Image (cartoon, grey):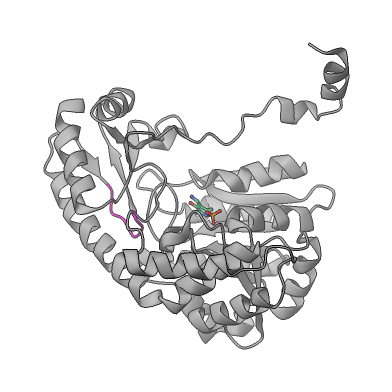
C-alpha cells in the first residue's frame, strides 16, 4: 500500500476501522422487497410535472427560501402543535446522528429497545456514547419492567422508541410508552418517538403530544418522507418544543437539505392525496399478504402496523437464498438479534410483487 495512505489510515479511529459500513444489498434484476420502499412511483403525468419543477430549480444558489416554505408545508401537513418547531434532516438518519452529536457529554448514553433500528446504536458508537439496548419480550412487546429499570439506572440522554418498530413492525402499548416518557422526565432525558412508518400505522404519538403538550416537553417526534414514497429524496423531520429545537438546530450542517430535495418534497406534499392512496393500497396488500403468509405451512407472520412483515421460517438462510434464486430480494434479519432467530423481513410490494413472493416462498423453505 502507498505508505502515505497507510500513515493516513492510522489517523482514522480504530473503532471505526473495526466497523462495517451500512450494507445495501444489490437488487439489480430482483423484485426489491428489502428496504420498506413504497413500490408505487408517481403516475407518468405527475412524474413529468415533477421533472419540470426540478428543471426550474436554480442550482447555482445555495438552498434558500424554499427550505422555509417546505418547513411551513410540513407544519401544515402534520398539524404542528402549538409551541413546537420543526427541523429538517437529510433523511431521518441524519437527524439521528445530529441528536447524538448534540447530546455528546461525558458518559451520556442512548437507549433503545432491541431488536430495533440499527442507526440508534450506530449513532451512539460513532459519537463515542454508550448504547444501552433493552431486549423486547419474545412476543416483541416492550419489556416494561426491564425498560423502566434500565432508564432509572442509565439515565440516558436519549431514549428511542420506533413507533412502529423496525423490524418487528408493531406499535407499543400506549401505557408503557407513557411510563417511559414519565420516567425519562424524572431525570431530564429526551425521548424520541420515531414514526418512520406512520403512513401505515393506526395511531400516531403526535395526537397524544398535541393533547398533552405539557407532558411532552422532552419528547420529540421524528418522521420521514422515505416510506411515504420519497426514499430517494432523503428528507426527515423532527418535531419538538421550540427551545429544544433551537439548540438542536445548531448542530445541523448548513444547507443539509438540497434545493432538489426540497422542491421534490414540496411537490409531493402538494400531491399528498396521491401518496395517501398509495398508502391505502399498501395497507390493503399488507392484510392480504398476512393472511396468505399465515396459510403457508411453516411460515409464521407477525402482526404489522408498517409496510413490512416479519415472518419466522424454519431456516431463514435457506429461505432467503431460495427467494433470491427465484428473483425476490428480502432482508434476512435472523442474525441481527437472538429474538429474531429464523426471521425474514418482507416489504409489502405491489400486488404483482407480493404474488411473486407468495409463489416463491413455499418452494424456498
Ligand atoms: N427510522 C426507522 C425506524 C427506520 O426503519 C428507518 C429506515 N429504514 C429510518 C428511521 C431512516 O429513514 P430515512 O433516513 O430514510 O428517513
In the displayed structure image, the side of residue 2 where residue 90 appears, left or right: left
Residue 162, given in percent of the width and then of the height, sits at: 50, 57
In the image, what residue occupies the spot 19% across and 34% down?
Answer: 361
Vertical side of 107 occupied by 342: above or below: above
Residue extending furthest toward the bottom: 82
Image quadrant holding the C terminus, namely top left
Vertical side of 259 occupied by 316: above or below: above
Magenta region, residue range = 302-307
Q: Is residue 69 magenta?
A: no
Residue 42, given in percent of the width and then of the height, sits at: 36, 63
- Looking at the rendered structure, the number of numbered marks drawn on it comes to 0
> For residue 43, what is the image quadrant?
bottom left
Q: Does the magenta stretch include residue 303?
A: yes
In the image, what residue occupies the spot 57% across and 36% down?
Answer: 22
Question: Foreground residue, 119 or 150?
Answer: 119
Main structural element of the magenta stretch: helix, strand or loop?
loop
Question: Foreground residue, 66 or 131?
Answer: 66
Image quadrant holding the N terminus, namely top right
Residue 175, given in percent of the width and then of the height, sits at: 45, 69
In the image, what residue occupies the spot 81% across and 29% down?
Answer: 12
Vertical side of 97 occupied by 358: above or below: above
Residue 11, given in percent of the width and then of the height, sits at: 86, 27
In the displayed structure image, the side of residue 193 where residue 297 appears, left or right: left
Question: Foreground residue, 270 or 86?
Answer: 270
> For residue 320, what is the image quadrant?
top left
Amino acid at each position: 500500500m502507498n505508505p502515505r495512505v497507510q500513515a493516513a489510515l492510522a489517523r482514522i479511529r480504530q473503532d471505526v476501522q473495526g466497523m462495517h459500513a451500512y450494507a445495501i444489498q444489490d437488487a439489480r434484476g430482483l423484485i426489491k422487497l428489502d428496504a420498506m420502499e413504497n413500490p408505487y412511483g408517481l403516475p407518468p403525468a405527475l412524474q413529468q410535472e415533477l421533472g419540470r419543477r426540478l428543471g426550474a430549480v436554480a442550482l447555482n444558489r445555495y438552498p434558500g427560501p424554499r427550505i422555509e416554505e417546505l418547513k411551513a408545508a410540513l407544519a401544515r401537513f402534520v398539524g404542528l402543535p402549538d409551541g413546537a418547531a420543526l427541523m429538517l434532516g437529510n433523511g431521518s438518519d441524519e437527524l439521528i446522528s445530529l441528536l447524538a452529536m448534540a447530546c455528546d457529554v461525558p458518559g451520556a448514553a442512548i437507549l433503545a429497545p432491541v431488536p430495533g433500528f440499527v442507526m440508534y446504536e450506530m449513532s451512539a458508537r460513532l459519537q463515542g456514547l454508550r448504547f444501552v439496548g433493552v431486549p423486547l419480550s419474545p412476543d416483541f412487546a416492550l419489556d416494561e419492567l426491564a425498560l423502566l429499570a434500565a432508564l432509572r439506572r442509565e439515565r440516558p440522554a436519549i431514549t428511542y422508541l420506533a413507533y412502529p418498530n423496525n423490524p418487528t413492525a408493531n406499535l407499543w402499548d400506549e401505557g408503557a410508552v407513557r411510563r417511559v416518557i414519565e420516567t425519562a422526565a424524572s431525570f431530564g432525558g429526551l425521548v424520541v418517538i420515531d414514526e418512520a412508518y406512520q403512513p401505515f400505522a393506526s395511531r400516531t404519538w403526535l395526537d397524544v403530544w398535541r393533547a398533552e403538550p405539557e407532558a411532552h416537553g422532552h419528547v420529540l417526534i421524528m418522521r420521514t418522507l422515505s416510506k411515504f414514497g420519497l426514499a430517494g429524496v432523503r428528507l426527515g423531520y423532527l418535531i419538538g418544543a421550540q427551545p429544544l429545537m433551537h439548540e438542536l438546530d445548531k448542530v445541523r450542517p448548513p444547507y443539509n437539505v438540497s434545493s432538489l430535495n426540497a422542491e421534490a418534497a414540496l411537490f409531493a406534499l402538494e400531491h399528498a392525496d396521491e401518496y395517501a392512496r398509495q398508502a391505502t393500497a399498501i395497507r390493503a396488500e399488507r392484510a392480504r399478504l398476512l393472511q396468505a403468509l399465515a396459510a403457508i405451512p411453516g411460515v409464521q407472520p407477525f402482526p404489522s402496523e408498517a409496510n413490512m412483515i416479519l415472518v419466522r421460517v424454519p431456516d431463514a438462510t435457506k429461505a432467503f437464498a431460495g427467494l433470491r434464486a427465484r428473483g425476490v430480494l428480502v432482508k434476512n434479519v435472523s442474525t441481527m438479534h437472538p429474538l429474531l432467530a429464523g426471521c425474514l423481513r418482507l416489504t409489502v410490494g405491489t400486488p404483482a410483487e407480493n404474488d411473486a413472493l407468495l409463489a416463491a416462498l413455499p418452494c424456498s423453505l
